Amino acid sequence: MVDDSAPREARTAPDPARASGTRFVFIDTEATGLDLSRQDLTEVSWVVRYEDGSEEERRYFPEHTLDGADDDALALTAYHEKIAPQPKTPMKVWLTEFLEHAEKAVLVGAVPDFDSRQLAKACERLQVEPTWDHHLLDVETLALPLIADGPQKPRSLAKTCQALGVEHDKHQAHGALYDARQAKAVFDRIWEMVAELRTTNAPLPPAVPVPGSNGNGKGNGGTKAAPEVDDNLVT
């Protein structure tokens, strides 16, 4: 396991205001593509928040093959520059630790269904049972009532951060540890806003238009927005 951006283990003091008796695991994985039947995990990271509010984080680069890899997925994660040089960890090592941290926990992330299916596939390979709760929390969906004026497709993690005022570094995005931390930051920001609304009895904040639209889902007078990478290609 290698973490070039933070200590291997980070613990924070419990925050009584947030300790709710539920364990959350903020999860993100990167892979050689979206096809679970033939493409592998290249990075898995998580931040576990224990029932008392304290936290630990982990980052692993699983053993994998590039057989059937999607070139776009490799480019999005800067695979050859950031992942390929790292020492790789056997599945039994990282998955065993994850299952311990995820015991009865709710997985939280940006499109966590992708991550949970990858993790379930790893469990199947090792013939072990998943330990996490069957509920999943997608922060991109959770944020919508606070940033949208009506039902709409969830925004990417980057656009959700932007709408909520959460700092987001596109150069670190699509690194599993960074995205897990960002999911946690969005999750916490949402509940901070909800707590403030309940305390002050204030109305919902104004909707935040999707970048590149005029607020109703249509383009700005026919002007074509600058192209951008799909932040949801690999979560």
Image (cartoon, rainbow, N blue to C red):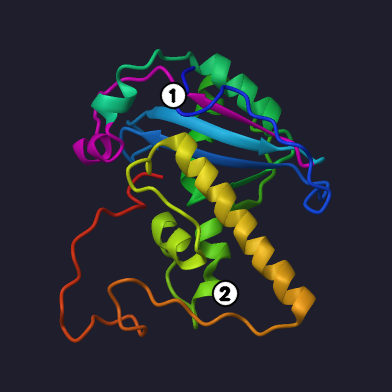
Percent across and percent down for residue 202 are 70, 83
Q: In front: 98, or 39? A: 98
Q: Quadrant of residue 95?
A: top right
Give yes or no for contact between labels 2 and 1 (Cβ–Cβ under 8 Å): no
* Left or right: residue 70 compared with residue 101: left
Percent across and percent down for residue 78 are 27, 33
Q: Quadrant of residue 9?
A: top right
Q: Is residue 132 visible?
A: yes
Q: Which is in the foreground here, disc 2 or disc 1?
A: 1
Which mark is first along the chain, 1 or 2? 1
The residue to which callout 1 is attached is 4
Give the quadrant of the C terminus.
top left
At label 2, the amino acid type is Pro
Q: In front: 232, or 80? A: 80
The residue to which callout 2 is attached is 145
Percent across and percent down for residue 166 are 50, 57
- Please give the range of residues in magenta: 53-78
Q: Quadrant of residue 101?
A: top right
* Left or right: residue 161 compared with residue 32: right
